[in-house]
Amino acid sequence: MENAGAPQAELVGEPPRPAAWLLLAALLGGNVALALGPWFVRMADAGPVSAGFWRLLLALPFLVLLARANGQRLSGMGGKTLALVALGAVTFALDLASWHTGIGMTRLGNAVLFGNAGSIVLLFWVFIAHRELPKPLEWLAIIFALTGAAILMGRSLEISTATLIGDLFCLAAGLLYAVYLLTLQGARGAFGSWSLLVWVSLFGCPVLLAIALALGEPVWPGDWGPIVGLFIGSQLIGQGLMVYSLKYFPPLVIGLALLTQPAVASLYGWLAFGEVLSALDILGMVLVGAALTVSRARAT
């Protein structure tokens, strides 16, 4: 990944690097758009898992167009790769089902923080894959993550057992997302992000629909506004801006920008849903956020 602070030699025929302010706006805008996803999940009158189904299904034709526009092929995937993509898609579907369920049960700031916990899982994977022990800063990140999570979950338990269970659903979603990323890391280089999202959506939609029906959720929404907002904001704008901007920034900047998500979610959780954060909550979120920044910088 390019270092955003260092001058880069431009290759002949390579498109010029976009303006720095535009790239930063895209990075922050993508994080804000993704942070608004839980709002739409809560407002949807379909079930939370059903909202995940529509989120993928409605975005599918646009993902095909984006893959084509970026010259990413949609065919020619071998049997082994296709099987890995199918496995990754199932994991992603379970991630969405778990996260959307947790969103309705816990505070939005917690939901977004724990939903991004996959970065910390990937940090552990780096240690295992490279057979190395954490460095001092990484040990500190682990301590921060455990301490912050304990604070936030303890505060959730003070509210209700259901709120704590919501935290656990969101944490499980973060773990599943890490597995999803690891499963598709080989195929991503060969096919590209948009092409893989097309196949992940194709395999993931039936899984989400089956889970929604098994849970007895209402699938067909009476109000399409939140569903349309979810797929446009999260799958198209959020994902699109992130895919566009990530390649231009070093991991540390990406990790710091990630903190926009829990901040935005906590703000509208307070304004729209009356979710008041205590000083202890803020401390827990700062600790987990710091851990996520370090882990994202290390594992990317």
Image (cartoon, grey):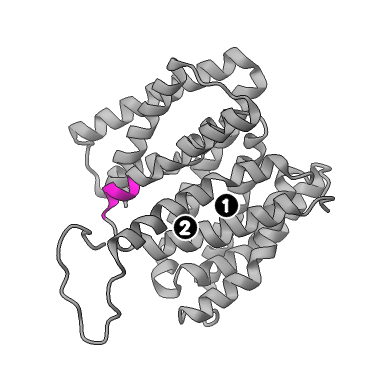
Q: Residue at x 62, y 29 (%)?
A: 166
Which three-letter amino acid code belongs to the residue tagged 1? Thr
Left or right: 46 in relation to 266: right
Are there few (<14), some (14-19), or many (20+) residues within 10 Å of tag 1? many
Residue at 21% across, 86% down: 12
Viewer-side residue, 274 vs 140:
274
**146 to the left or right of 104:** left
Residue 174 appears in the rendering: yes
Quadrant occupied by the N terminus: bottom left
Residue 207 makes an appearance in the image: no
- Residue 209 in the image: x percent, y percent? 75, 54
Report the residue at 43% width, 16% height from top: 279
Measured as percent of width and height from the top left, residue 29 is found at 45, 53
- Residue 252 drawn in magenta: yes
Reply above or below: 285 against 233: above
> Where residue 45 appears, x then y in whole percent?
79, 44
Residue denoted by label 1: 91
Give the extent of the magenta segment.
250-255
- Which residue is denoted by mark 2 in the rendering? 183
Q: Residues within 10 Å of mark 2 (few under 14, many from 20)?
A: some
Residue occupying the point 46% across, 78% down: 70
